Image: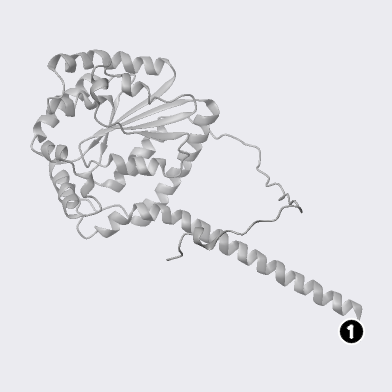
Amino acid sequence: MTAPHVTDEASHEDALRDEASREEALRARIHQEMADSLDEELELELDDIRLEELEHDGAGQPSIDRKFYFRELLRLQGELVKLQDWVQHEKKKVVVLLEGRDSAGKGGVIKRITQRLNPRVCRIAALPAPNERERTQWYFQRYVSHLPAGGEIVLFDRSWYNRAGVEKVMGFCTDEQYEEFFNSVPEFERMLIRSGTILLKYWFSITDEEQAFRFSMRIQDPLKQWKLSPMDVEARTRWELYTKAKETMLERTHLADSPWWIVDAVDKKRARLNCISHLLSQIPYQHVTHQPVMLPPRVRNPDYHRGPIPPEMYVPGRY
């Protein structure tokens, strides 16, 4: 006959083993969840990995170390989450304009900024060409409807500065409309700032050679061909006209209260880190303290019985 205290010891050891097993399983799940989160960033970098042997550095500098890049990007994205929290808590309004030539890397920076943020707080405004009705409106009217309310961040992937760039170069506006834009935009931006909007303007700068290389890669890459429009191809033939338009735009709209910031974008990874780091430095956000979140116990109703789901309703498990 087994002594009671021996049975109790064995039961206690079994309980300890079960607890250790559950903790190990939980650690494995946490590790997998963290790996999945990091894979989200890796998915965005597949283009760089896939084309690494073909890429070059227009400035003759070695590309930034990959491990350092990921480490810094994740750190900066952590700060962006803090910024988002502060903007939402303080009901701030933030507008970020991202301008530059086609293939300058605006979209890549926008993806890294928004990747870990709440789309209800931080959203992207990428407006198509104006329709017939919009062409008869006050020029800024269609942009106004996309401006943030309190607690929101809006990233404009191209903005009202289309009039100073593509519309001027491609002849989509008259000389009178072009001049009126320069007369109006300083006061328009001052109105935004007076209303409490934090406004940041970035121009992504690349060389002629770098744009030609990126265009050629898009032509050969079936995953990127959609990015190259007939307008982009036409713009290549008007490089100098775009340069003159950019210089005029910067000269006439680089204002004391809404200055332009130039991002050297030949190296895409450096451009992303530099732009995000600078953006964070321009906004006086602070850490927001929240009450700890406690997960309540699961409420179980003994009268509830889950009904069967027909097998044909499930997505096929092909992977």
Residue 179: x and y in percent read: 17, 15
Can residue 146 be seen from the camera position used here? yes
Left of 189 or right of it: where is 51? Answer: left
Which of these two is toward me, 103 or 270? 103
Residue 74: x and y in percent read: 43, 48
Q: Residue at x 32, y 22 (%)?
A: 142
| Residue 276, quarter of the rendered image | top left
Judging from the image, what secondary structure is the residue with disc 1 in? loop
Q: Which residue is mark 1?
A: 2
User: How many numbered marks appear?
Assistant: 1
Q: Residue at x 24, y 50 (%)?
A: 224
Left of 253 or right of it: where is 79? Answer: right
Residue 209: x and y in percent read: 13, 45
Q: Is residue 111 above or below residue 319?
A: above
| Residue 235, quarter of the rendered image | top left
Question: Could you tell me the amino acid type at mark 1?
Answer: Thr
Q: Residue at x 83, y 75 (%)?
A: 9
Q: Residues within 10 Å of mark 1 (few under 14, many from 20)?
A: few
Can residue 254 be seen from the camera position used here? no
Quadrant housing the N terminus = bottom right
Q: Is residue 26 above or below residue 198?
A: below
Q: Is residue 47 above or below residue 153?
A: below
Residue 151: x and y in percent read: 49, 28
Q: Residue at x 16, y 41 (%)?
A: 207
* Colour style of the rendered protein structure: one colour
Quadrant housing the C terminus = bottom left
